[in-house]
Structure formats: structure tokens, C-alpha cells
Amino acid sequence: AEAELICVGAAAGVSAAFGAPLAGVLFAVEELGTTMPTGLRYSTMLCAFSSAVVAALALKWLDLTRTQRLTLFEIDYKQAWAPWEALPFCLLGVIGGIAGAAFIIANEAVHRRRLAAEADGRLTWW
């Protein structure tokens, strides 16, 4: 019951922060629902969606920033991005993917060495 309430609260929080009720529910299902042994019930997801919608609408109704917008923060671009800027962003994405893959490979290698050190009775893996 407590984990389900945490799931509902997380959905409402993400929804209020980003102005996206469905994203709040999907976040809660993906991140918190996988830790529960029986998974999430439909009633929990319905409550999470309801709380997310209510949080988003209440934030819009309160209008804390006096902008009549759904989110607390927003970026207004003064000019559109140029088409040539897509290439550096794609390059950054590829570099980030390669760096992430290298980190996973290094982490697996360290994990294997730690397991081998533990099997040998050593305290350190290096």
C-alpha cells in the first residue's frame, strides 16, 4: 500500500513539474512499478493518472507565474534553430552513446574482477 502511494505521488509530482500527466504516470509505472513484486494494479495506475491530471490542472489554475501556462518553467526561443545545428547535436548523441557503451563495458569488467577477487578470498579487486 505504501509503495502504491509513493507511485501515485511520484506521478503527480512529475506531472506538475513538467505539465505532462501521461508522462508522470509512465514514469511511475516504469521506475516504481518494476520494484513491486506483484507489479502495479490497474487501480493504482488510475489513481496515479487522476492525481497527475489534478496536479497539472491545479497548477494551471493557481497560475503561480502569471503566464497561463501549464509548466513552472519553460524556454522561449527568440529565433528558430538553424538546420546546420542538427549535425553537432547528432554528433553529441553518437559520442554520448559510445561513452555510455564504454562505461558499461568497463563496469562489467570491474564487476567480473571483483567477483574473481571475492572467490579468491582477496579484499581488493585490483
Image: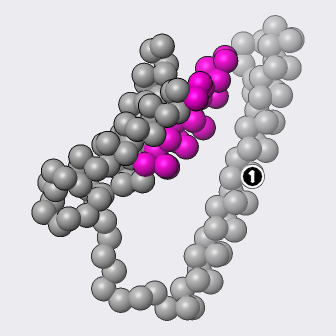
Residue identified by numbered label 1: 101
Residue extent of the magenta highlight: 21-42
| Location of residue 57 in the rendering, given as x and y in whole percent from the top left corner | 28, 50
User: Dot 1 surroundings within 10 Å: few (below 14), some, or many (20 or more)?
Assistant: few
The image quadrant of residue 37 is top right
**The disc labelled 1 sits on which kind of residue?**
Ala
The percent position of residue 19, horizontal first and vertical second, equals 36, 54
Relative vertical location of residue 111 with respect to residue 61 in this rendering, above or below = above
- Which quarter of the rendering shows the C terminus? top right
Query: Is 40 contained in the magenta span?
Result: yes
Task: Determine the residue positioned at 30% across, 76% down.
Answer: 76
Q: Residue furthest top?
A: 121
Residue in view at x 86 percent, y 12 percent: 119
Q: Residue at x 73, y 60 (%)?
A: 98
Instruction: Specify whether 13 is left or right of 45.
Output: left
| Residue 124, quarter of the rendered image | top right
- Decide: is 46 above or below 4: below
Magenta region's main secondary structure? helix
Please, what secondary structure does the residue beneath circle 1 have?
Answer: helix
**Residue at 23 percent of width and 55 percent of height:** 60
Q: Nearer the viewer, residue 48 or 105?
A: 48
> Compared with residue 89, is residue 47 higher up or lower down, i.e. above or below?
above
Type of colouring = one colour
Q: Is residue 8 left or right of residue 111?
A: left
Q: Is residue 89 visible?
A: yes
Q: Position of residue 86 (x, y in %)?
A: 58, 83
